[in-house]
Image: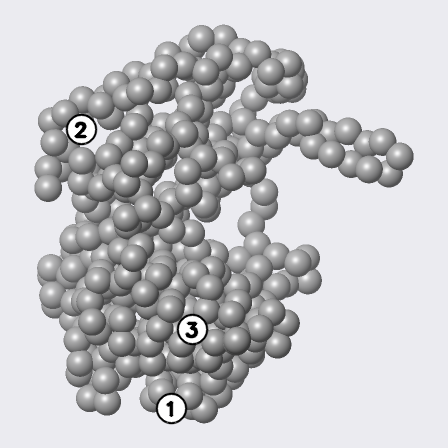
Amino acid sequence: MARTADQLRAHLVGDLRSKGAIRSAAVAEAFAAVPRERFIPEVLSAEGLEAVYRDQAHVTKKDARGMPLSSSSQPSLMARMLELLELRPGQRVLEIGTGTGYNAALLAHLVGPRGRVTSVDVDAGLARRARRALRESGFRVSVSVADARQGRASSTQYDRIIVTACADQIPRNWLDQLKEGGLLELPLRLDPDSAAIQVIPVFQRHGDRLRSIGLTWGSFMPLHGGDGGWQPPPASLNASRSNAGTHSSLGSLAGPGLSALSEAAGRELLASVLSDRQRPRATGFLHWSAADPPLLLIYLLLAIPANKRLAIHSDGMLGVGLIHRHSRSLAFVSVRTPWTEGPEWKNTRFRWRLDAYGGDDAAADLERLLQNWRAMRRAGRQVLRIAAVGAGETLRLRFGWTRP
């Protein structure tokens, strides 16, 4: 017997609680009250009501090249972000990136009738659709069309600002629109070529600076100003095979660490990868407990110089590595366990690898970084702190590792 929307919402809430994504009664009530099918009707018509309430993201708009432009995010990620935002009835909230309007509806439920939610999106079509879905669902949200990178042209200050697309920088005017002591939450892309690895901090305003007070992680599409967010692909090395009209990839590397390689060095490095001369190394010190988020990859993104860095994201593998040009060598750390949290982490064996190709220099460099990571952990410096300061158009980001 098919379950009703109310039953499916209740099941979703239970699922998100079991994963640790929902921790408060307020967020649970919001997910139980907001009809997600009103905001993603294409999923309802194509896949049915059960698909609407699965804990998964749904792409809702693509560009002419078939690249995603907008989506309804994974509910567990949305719940984690809402919990960190600590929303209260009566607050004023600015959402940057309206999308389908589903998150705006959750925000409106959390701040209640005395609160106010303002949402902006650069895409007029998405804004119209979200505005209609919100109105028909009974949620009072002000939706307008604007370049999300510019925030909202208003003197209003907000208790909370939430950004639902990843950014490389924090515009100064986001800080200016935040009340003293208010919270700003946004996905930060630490490397343009590794969009799959994003840290999502919650900042609190202290005068002219922002200081992180919590974080989670996930993956969002980039914030853009109406151009679809298209960016030139990173430097890459690729080998493929064609046979009777069938094409397959034999090997691929991508990242800024490849940009300065000569053709000869590139051929030699790719040949070493294709020859499968990899040497898995001891990775016992990479294991972490069930309570630890996957901060090691974020540490490596911050620690490896951009001109040596590579990011790997394919076939369920997520990793970060470095390249040593002089010795034509490459090494990377990767993991195949999904990024989740909650009870399912217990007794999980994370399948970490440290693989090396070519010479030994890259592996030696990477192992030194991993030894530094282990020393930081032993010293208790396992919390990533981020500060954003500056008087220019964008704030300067500063990263540090501290004790809890």
Residue 57 image point, x, y percent: 48, 61
In the depicted structure, whether residue 320 falls above or below residue 390: above
In the depicted structure, whether residue 278 falls above or below residue 245: above
Q: What's the residue type where badge 1 is placed? A: Gly
Residue 240 image point, x, y percent: 73, 30
Residue 5 image point, x, y percent: 45, 79
Residue at image x 33%, y 68%?
Answer: 13
Q: Can residue 134 be seen here?
A: yes
Q: Nearer the viewer, residue 174 or 15?
A: 15
**Dot 3 lies on which element?**
helix
**Dot 2 lies on which element?**
helix
**Badge number at residue 8:** 3
Residue at image x 26%, y 32%?
Answer: 288
Residue at image x 60%, y 16%?
Answer: 276
Residue 403 image point, x, y percent: 10, 37
Q: Residues within 10 Å of mark 2 (few under 14, many from 20)?
A: some
Q: Residues within 10 Å of mark 1 (few under 14, many from 20)?
A: few
Residue marked by disc 1: 138
In the depicted structure, whether residue 145 falls above or below residue 284: below
Q: What's the residue type where badge 2 is placed? A: Arg
